[in-house]
Image (tube, rainbow, N blue to C red):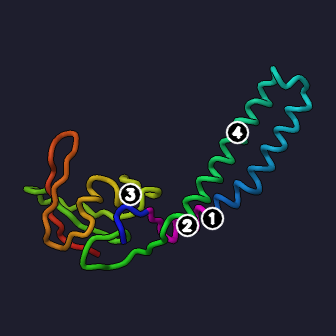
Amino acid sequence: MNSGDQYITEEKKQALLAELEELKTTKRKEILDALEFAKSLGDLSENAEYHQARDDQAKLEDRITKIKNILTTSKVVSKHHSTSVEVGSTVIVSKEDAKEKKKYQIVGAEEADMASGKISNASPLGAALYGKKKGDTISFKTPSGVINYKIIDIE
């Protein structure tokens, strides 16, 4: 695996496929209905409903294009155990001089969510962890200075 590639989990792939289907069917029809209604109101040059519907349509088509791009260019990875940190690994780390341990799952940028412990392989911490092994110490720069972590375990 290359740390520069884009990755998604199987769960994220299924969520994107479901969202894509919803956008292409239900949401497209809703916007087309809104456009038809707005056209029926008359003069399009000063028709706020028409312009809003057109903006909504553009945003919808942009999202559809983005999802299709993610699905065609990303590699699907599953959560797995490895001896070195890679996308799909779960890593337990502790800050230097601290007893508190933190658990992170390394994921692609599209599904990174710090609140749920999912960090991107492209984030400063994710990039620093990438390829390292249990027991290694890593350092990376943050706005408040350099932070050091020790890898306690890789799941």
Q: Earlier in the sequence, mark 3 or mark 4?
A: 4
Region in magenta = 6-17
- Residue toward you, 113 or 50: 50
CA neighbours of label 4 inside 10 A, class few (<14), some (14 to 19), many (20+): some
| SS assignment at label 3 | helix
Are dots 3 and 4 in contact, CB under 8 Å?
no
Distance CA(mark 2)–CA(mark 1): 6 Å
Q: Please state the horizontal and vertical placement of residue 69, each as a whole percent of the image.
A: 58, 58
Would you say residue 119 is visible in this rendering? no
User: Callout 2, which amino acid?
Assistant: Lys
Comparing labels 1 and 3, the label whose residue is closer to the camera: 1
Res. 13 mark = 2
Q: Position of residue 63 (x, y in %)?
A: 62, 49
Relative to 121, does residue 89 appear above or below in the rendering? Answer: below
The secondary structure making up most of the magenta span is helix
Mark with earlier residue (2, 3): 2
Label 2 packing within 10 angstroms: few (<14), some (14-19), many (20+): some
In this view, the residue in front, 129 or 105, is: 129
Callout 2 touching callout 1 (CB < 8 Å): yes
